[in-house]
Image (cartoon, rainbow, N blue to C red):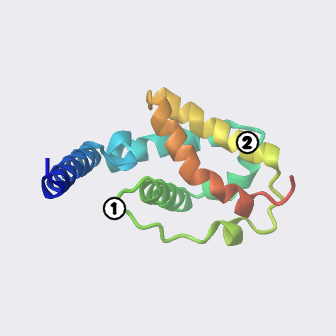
Amino acid sequence: MNSTFKQWISCGAMALVLAASSSAQARQKSLYDRLGGKAAITAVVDEFVGRVAADTRINKFFAAAASNPQHLAMFKMKLADQICQASGGPCKYTGMDMKAAHKGMGITSAQFTALVEDLVDALDKFKVGEKEKSELLGALGPMKTDIVEKP
């Protein structure tokens, strides 16, 4: 075999590998899609907020929003948008940044963990897969440093 022919075969093989790789990536749905889209995210948020409201470890932080139906609806909408955006969906979160929203609340690591537990329980109720849960928690997890003020 001459070297030109070998190069042509190598380029062809590489092109096939790249095409197969990009085709597999195109077939893989975004986390947003795998979660079920905005309707499914909204259902999880409704369940999650209900769990948080009943959780005596953390419900004091949400008492003001929970006592006003308009505030509660806005809170849920912004939370759904935040999860939608974090999961690669078309939504745009327009709320406050997490540091400003939680400034002075004195949230501890244990309270943040309680919040995550409530979210996981809500995801479990809707039978969200382990891979999707891990990816979502990985996308939301970095917010901890902006939310927790007391380790």
Which kind of residue does numbered mark 1 sit on? Pro
Q: Going 54% across and 59% down the picture, which residue do you hit?
A: 75
Task: Assess disc 2: are there few (<14), some (14-19) or many (≥20) residues with their C-alpha within 10 Å of its C-alpha.
Answer: few
Estimate the x, y position of residue 136 in percent, counting from the top left: 51, 45
Q: Residue extending furthest right?
A: 150
Judging by the rendered image, the residue that carries numbered circle 2 is 113
For the residue pair 30 and 14, the one nearer the viewer reads as 14
Residue 19 position in % (x across, y down): 20, 50
Residue shown at the point (49%, 27%) measured from the top left: 125
| Residue lying at 58% horizontally and 31% vertically, measured from the top left | 121
Q: Which amino acid is tagged 2?
A: Thr
Image quadrant of residue 56? top right
Residue 113 at what x, y percent from top left?
A: 73, 42
Q: Which mark is residue 90?
A: 1
Locate residue 122, reporting x and y percent: 53, 34
Instruction: Decide if residue 67 is in sight here.
Output: no
- Left or right of residue 85: residue 121: right
Give the CA separation, mark 1 to mark 2: 28 Å
